[in-house]
Amino acid sequence: MGHLIVLTTVGNEEQANLLADELVVRRHAACVHVVKVGRTVYRWQGRVFDDNEYLLISKTTDDEYPAVEATIRELSTYELPETLGFKVHRGSAEFLDWITASLDKDAEFSDDIEPR
């Protein structure tokens, strides 16, 4: 089974937290880092925009990528949400096993999110 790092961006902290929570609770990602990246400059529909964004970095598997992408599309407010997946070529066996185990839909896990 291959492992992936998936990147996406959102426009505010509330949406970043919602998306991170849902990806983990739905067991599509083992872990999601939420990073306030600040300024993003981009071209969209013939204009240049300057916004603030949050970057989400998800750890998942090849098998879960379609569900990760679907969840991002479902919950993002962006018309064209960024979804980029990068193959993990090396990593500790224990960590990669943890990613795989965390996505097991049949495993007995609590889906309650511990307080931040």
Image: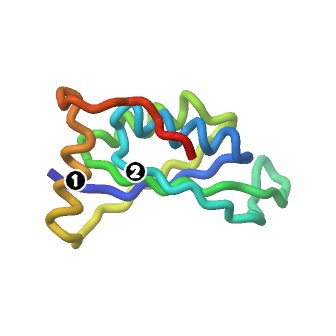
Q: Which residue is mark 1?
A: 98
How packed mark 2 is, by other alpha carbons closer than 10 Å (few <14, some 14-19, many 20 or more), is many
Q: Quadrant of residue 53?
A: bottom right
What amino acid is at disc 1? Trp
Residue 104 relative to residue 110: left or right? left
Is disc 2 placed on a helix, strand or loop?
A: strand
* Most distant residue in the front direction: 115
The residue sitting at 83% across, 57% down in the picture is 49
Residue 51 relative to residue 74: left or right? right
Q: Are marks 1 and 2 in contact (CB under 8 Å)?
A: no
Q: Earlier in the sequence, mark 1 or mark 2?
A: 2
Instruction: Give x and y (percent) for residue 82.
Output: 57, 49
Colour convention of the picture: rainbow
Residue 1 relative to residue 112: left or right? left
Image vertical order of residue 64 relative to residue 99, above or below: above
Q: Quadrant of residue 36?
A: bottom right
Q: Which residue is mark 2?
A: 31
Instruction: Give x and y (percent) for residue 30.
Output: 34, 47
The residue sitting at 26% across, 39% down in the picture is 103
Q: Residue 60's mark?
A: none
The residue sitting at 55% across, 28% down in the picture is 74
Image vertical order of residue 43 relative to residue 69, above or below: below
The residue sitting at 23% across, 62% down in the picture is 95
Is disc 1 placed on a helix, strand or loop?
A: helix
Q: CA distance from mark 1 to mark 2?
A: 10 Å
Instruction: Give x and y (percent) for residue 11.
Output: 73, 47
Instruction: Give x and y (percent) for residue 27.
Output: 33, 35
